[in-house]
Amino acid sequence: MKLRSVRFKVSVLYTSVLGAILLVYSLMLYFNLGYSLSRAIDSDLRKKVLEIEETTNLYSQAFDTTEEKDVVSVRRALHINEMADREAFQWPSVRKIDQSWRYRIQALGIKHDYVVVYSSSGEVLETSQNVDEELLPILKALFHTTLKGKTTIRDFDSKEYRLRIITHPLYRGANIRYIFQIATPTEAHQLLLKTKMRLILISIPVFLLFTSFLGSFFVLRVFDPVMEITRAARQISYRDMGKRVELKHADDEIKSLVDAFNDMIWRLEKSFRHIDDFSSNVAHELKTPLAIIRGELEVSLRKERTAGEYQKSIGIAIEEVQRVLKTINDLLLLAKLDYRTEVFAFEPVELNEFMQEIYEQSKLIAAGKKIEIGIKAAEQPLTINANKLHLRRLFFNLIDNAIKFTPREGKVEIALERRHKEARVSVRDTGVGIPAEDLPRIFERFFHVDRTNEAPSTNGLGLSIVQSIAKIHNGVVNVESEPGKGTVFTVSLPLL
Amino acid sequence: MTTILVVDDEERIRSFYYRLLASEGYRVEEAENADEANDILKSEPVDLVLLDFRMPGANGGDLCEVIKLFHQRVKVIVASVYPVTEQKKRVPGAEEYYDKSRGISELFSKIKSVLLGPELEP
């Protein structure tokens, strides 16, 4: 797995997020457990110390409350378990306390705790039996660093002992009479916490390792279609555009990617084919006149000809040279119109006036074919933002076409009108018309409509130029035609 | 006299080949499209067709097939400005292919060799 692969990044990302979550969660549980355990110990300790206090008080009441008898009470409370039955008082009230206290000691689990009772001056009065020579100094030292007036709880940790210790004063009136110190061993709890911590530290890495493998596998499955697309993309080339990505079972997101990809290939294929056709057309359109020129020149050289024949050949050659130049200029213009629209300067142009000029000039051409040409201006001024040079070219092309494809003594009519926020200029002729099946294609580059014998041949770029010029003016060109009756081209241009 | 039928949709090309071939002593017929060519083939004795395949309507390829089916004696030279390899791809089955931009002497030699027929070739 490479470091820069998505698979690696996703793996690292979700493993670390998962790790962080697991760690935080586990530590939360761990500390909560520790806290709960100490709370439980504390509440036990409080209960124990209160019960010892209460029992001591009960004994004191039973024995009477002299100071000496109080010590007896404390001793009895601490050692009741070790006392044999014979030591028991036959005194019924004391016997009753003995019995209940024995039972309580069992219930509270005081047996394992270390109990020390101090006098108000800090002398050790009594200890439980399990407090030995070693432990007593520790407990005494702790006792002397503790506030005496109220109940306190603290921890003690050493190699031998782990203890939680409560210190609790017993009051007689306003004075402290005794101070109880109960230390309970916490090894069991510590051990529990330690085990938990070890479990956390071991289980998290194992868990993460497992999920990262699992995740990596899933990511691989998710990326399977991507690999498929990559393979297909590598195989697709200019020579073989037929290749498509096929996925048997893809998820929606991947499917839309695949569809978009295939669609893009389809469009590429189309535009490659378009370029292919286009260059083939360009070659045809440029080579045909050159073939004729070459032919004419070779014919002239072949043998001695009359002056008339030479003149004819030279005339044809010049005509064909002009044709080549026109095609080249048209192609350059189209490229400029399509890709470099920023080079054209625009200015406000009043169309009625503008078309009137074009009409005057067209009359001369129309007269040659005895075609009647007319113009119908709009009632209101039509001002648009236009590049005069190219707009003139647009309408000359349309009118020139109309004249070309209209038989002698036909009619061409130019009409202007305002429609909403548009100026519409239509050029209507009574010419041969365009077959319905050709209409959608007439603006394509190099498209030739079936020509009649009378119409001179064109290079098939005129209407493309018309459309491209309309486009740079944010306008559109529409065409309606009826074969045999005529054609109307309508140019719609947005008004200023 | 040998008759050559020039099939091309461009009037200026037809007129050039008409003058060229006529001055070499051939009888020349002209057709603007496949239908016209077919009519001429049915009514006149044609020896050779000089065929452009880029035409509106039925294209040169179709016409070539028709000639090979119904007028086996008629020879076909495909003539267009496309490179010969592409011509062969588009119109298979013609006797010869001629790139119009190659000059007239190549055209004459191709016409002559096709009219002489394959049996006389070495």
Image (tube, rainbow, N blue to C red):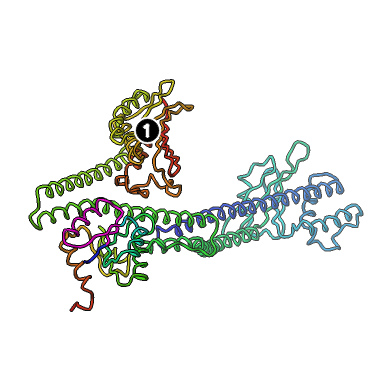
Between A25 and A309, the one nearer to me in the picture: A309
What type is the residue that disc 1 sits on? His
User: Does A461 sit left or right of A246 as displayed?
Assistant: left
Would residue B21 be found to the left or right of residue B43 on screen? Answer: left
Where residue A185 sits, quadrant-wise, is bottom right
- The answer to whether A229 is drawn above or below residue A464 in the figure is below
**Within the image, what quadrant is residue A148 found in?**
top right
**Mark count:** 1
- A307 versus A149 height, above or below: below
Residue A108 in view here: yes
Residue at horizontal 48 percent and vertical 63 percent from the top: A246
Q: Can you give x and y, in whole percent of width and height, for residue A381 in the image?
A: 41, 21
Quadrant (top left/top right/bottom left/bottom right) for the C terminus of chain A: top left
In this orientation, which residue lies closer to the viewer: A131 or A274? A274
Q: Label 1 crowding class (10 Å Cα cut-off): few <14, some 14-19, many 20+?
A: many
Say which chain tag 1 marks: A
